[in-house]
Image (cartoon, helix red, strand yellow):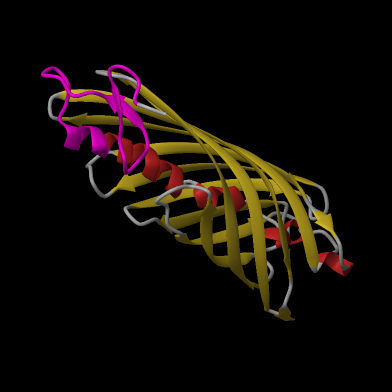
Amino acid sequence: MGDRPGLRRDERTRFELPVEHDDYPSENYMSRLASVALMTIVSLLPVVSAVAQVCVGTASFASGPARVGVGLDFAKDAKQYGAQIAVGKPAGPFAAGSVAMVDIDEIDESATVLGIDLGYSLNVAGKGSLGICPVVGFSHATADVDEGGFSIDLTSRTLRAGFAIGGVSSSSPTFKFIPSAGLAYVNEKAKTEDAFEFEQSEDFGVITVAAGLVFNDRVTVRPNLAFPVGLDDSDPTFGVGISLNFGTPTAAR
């Protein structure tokens, strides 16, 4: 398919961008804006599995029905850091809300990301030692980019749906090792406004693997890797999260 009138296709990001004129920013500036959109997509990938259950490699809600956590994720040209709060049942529904900042290496500005995830935990082994969770989520990212005398408002909307499976591999009275894996379908739409406008939508998959290190049934340290599938010129994302379950525990752990 050829370029539409007045637009050109950026070969690196595949966004359709305005053909350069005297009153438009430089091609380098346009590429940076497209990079912001693309890196926002990649940096959001770990959010797909950032909920709290054994199925994703964290302490069970049996140890406390609420959870707070912080995380740091690294993509090739960006990093994301944020916080999350989650509530739920050890076998049943759960929900999580998150806020994060995405720093892009090529520009000074950061994107703000708000997200929500909903899921349902299904225990398939005794006392919740193995779980499967269907999960759906939504994220909205915004960034105000000011460069070269031009101001651009970038927004990105992400929808995702998938499942995760995880279980207790080894345990002691004070420690559990909970590996997990997840698969999700993601639809992301990014657009800009103000000085000029462009819009792009991407559909891709995400495979996530994680190693949950749970201490005293409440504190979780969770390194993870996310691999995008079907997204051109993308790289794996590495992250680590720390979380704490609190509240009155239930009988089953």
**Is residue 15 magenta-colored?**
yes
**Is residue 1 magenta-colored?**
no
Which residue of the protein is positioned furthest toward the left in this rendering?
Answer: 22
Which residue of the protein is positioned furthest toward the right in this rendering?
Answer: 126
Q: Position of residue 24 (x, y in %)?
A: 17, 21
In the foreground, 197 or 63: 197
Quadrant the N terminus occupies: top left
Which residue of the protein is positioned furthest toward the front in this rendering?
Answer: 1
Above or below for 175 versus 63: below
Kindly identify the residue that appears in the image at 15 percent across and 20 percent down.
21
Q: Position of residue 169 (x, y in %)?
A: 72, 77
Kindly identify the residue that appears in the image at 31 percent across and 17 percent down.
5
In the foreground, 97 or 1: 1
Above or below for 11 versus 43: above
**136 on left or right of 197:** right
Residue 53 seen in this snapshot: yes
Quarter occupied by residue 102? top left
Residue 57 seen in this snapshot: no
Above or below for 31 versus 5: below
Q: Position of residue 72 (x, y in %)?
A: 43, 57
Instruction: Report the magenta stretch's main SS.
Output: loop
First to last magenta residue range: 3-32
Above or below for 141 versus 49: above
In the foreground, 198 or 97: 198
